[in-house]
Image (tube, grey):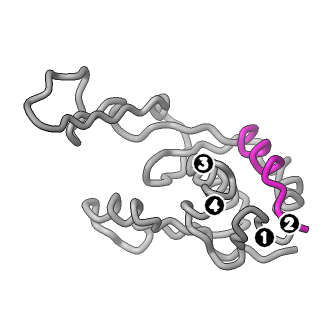
């Protein structure tokens, strides 16, 4: 049975919370409290609408975001495994057993945010392992570059 995307998304919604890492607002790559007037040429502004990580929260670092998993997540494990089915997504043919990266899963689930949340959830439930740039010792300067190129994988899914 192919993966049930709507059911996966429902479970992700029920069991995960997204937090931003770092500042809410960046201008030309630098964190700022408020926007400054442009200083000539192109002015790049990035805004992150997620709330900051609460003190004491147990989160999984997914490079671009932090994901908190609900404490009752084990109650959803069998539902998630059933929704994953054989791990083959019909839309683009991505297969969990091949260790897809978040960009492929994002195409299947409708957004890269859902992909990152789904990957964190499966990792917490020991359905697979994450392979992130920081897991292989990438320097802080390389982590964002590697992530931007798609380097964040879910490895080890075996269909039941």
Q: Is residue 135 above or below residue 54?
A: below
Determine whether the residue tagged by mark 4 lies in a helix, strand or loop: helix
Q: Which badge, 2 or 4, comes first in the chain's sequence?
A: 2
* Residue 6 lies in the magenta-colored region: yes
**Cβ atoms under marks 2 and 1 closer than 8 Å:** yes
Q: Is residue 83 above or below residue 2?
A: above
Residue bearing the label numbered 4: 105
C-alpha distance separating marks 3 and 2: 19 Å
- Residue 134 visible: no
Determine whether the residue tagged by mark 2 lies in a helix, strand or loop: loop
Determine whether the residue tagged by mark 1 lies in a helix, strand or loop: loop
- Which residue is at the front of the view, 71 or 61? 61
The answer to whether 66 appears left or right of 104 in the picture is left
**Cβ atoms under marks 1 and 3 closer than 8 Å:** no
Where, by quadrant of the figure, is residue 119 drawn? bottom right
Q: Which badge, 1 or 4, comes first in the chain's sequence?
A: 1
Q: Which badge, 2 or 1, comes first in the chain's sequence?
A: 2
Q: Which residues are magenta?
A: 1-15
Crowd tier of the residue under label 4, counting other residues whose Cα lies within 10 Å: few below 14, some 14–19, many 20 or above: many
Quadrant of the rendering where the C terminus is positioned: bottom right
The answer to whether 72 appears left or right of 129 in the picture is right
Residue drawn 25% across the image and 61% down it: 141
Rendering coords of residue 117 (x, y %): 62, 49
| Residue 2: mark | 2
Where, by quadrant of the figure, is residue 97 drawn? bottom right
Residue bearing the label numbered 1: 88
Residue drawn 77% across the image and 47% down it: 73
Rendering coords of residue 7 (x, y %): 83, 48
Q: Which badge, 1 or 3, comes first in the chain's sequence?
A: 1
Residue drawn 68% across the image and 76% down it: 156
Residue bearing the label numbered 3: 111
């Amino acid at each position: 049975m192919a993966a049930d995307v709507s059911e996966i998304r429902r479970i992700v919604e029920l069991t995960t919370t997204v937090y931003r890492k770092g500042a809410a607002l960046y201008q030309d790559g630098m964190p700022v409290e408020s926007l400054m007037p442009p200083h000539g040429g192109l002015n790049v502004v990035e805004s992150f609408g997620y709330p900051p990580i609460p003190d004491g929260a147990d989160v999984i670092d997914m490079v671009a975001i932090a994901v908190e998993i609900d404490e009752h997540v084990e109650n959803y494990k069998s539902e998630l495994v059933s929704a994953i089915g054989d791990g083959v997504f019909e839309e683009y043919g991505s297969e969990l057993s091949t260790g897809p990266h978040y960009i492929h899963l994002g195409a299947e689930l409708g957004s890269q945010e859902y992909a990152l949340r789904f990957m964190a959830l499966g990792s917490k439930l020991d359905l697979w392992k994450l392979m992130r740039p920081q897991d292989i010792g990438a320097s802080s300067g390389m982590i964002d570059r590697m992530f931007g190129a798609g380097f964040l994988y879910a490895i080890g899914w075996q269909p039941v």
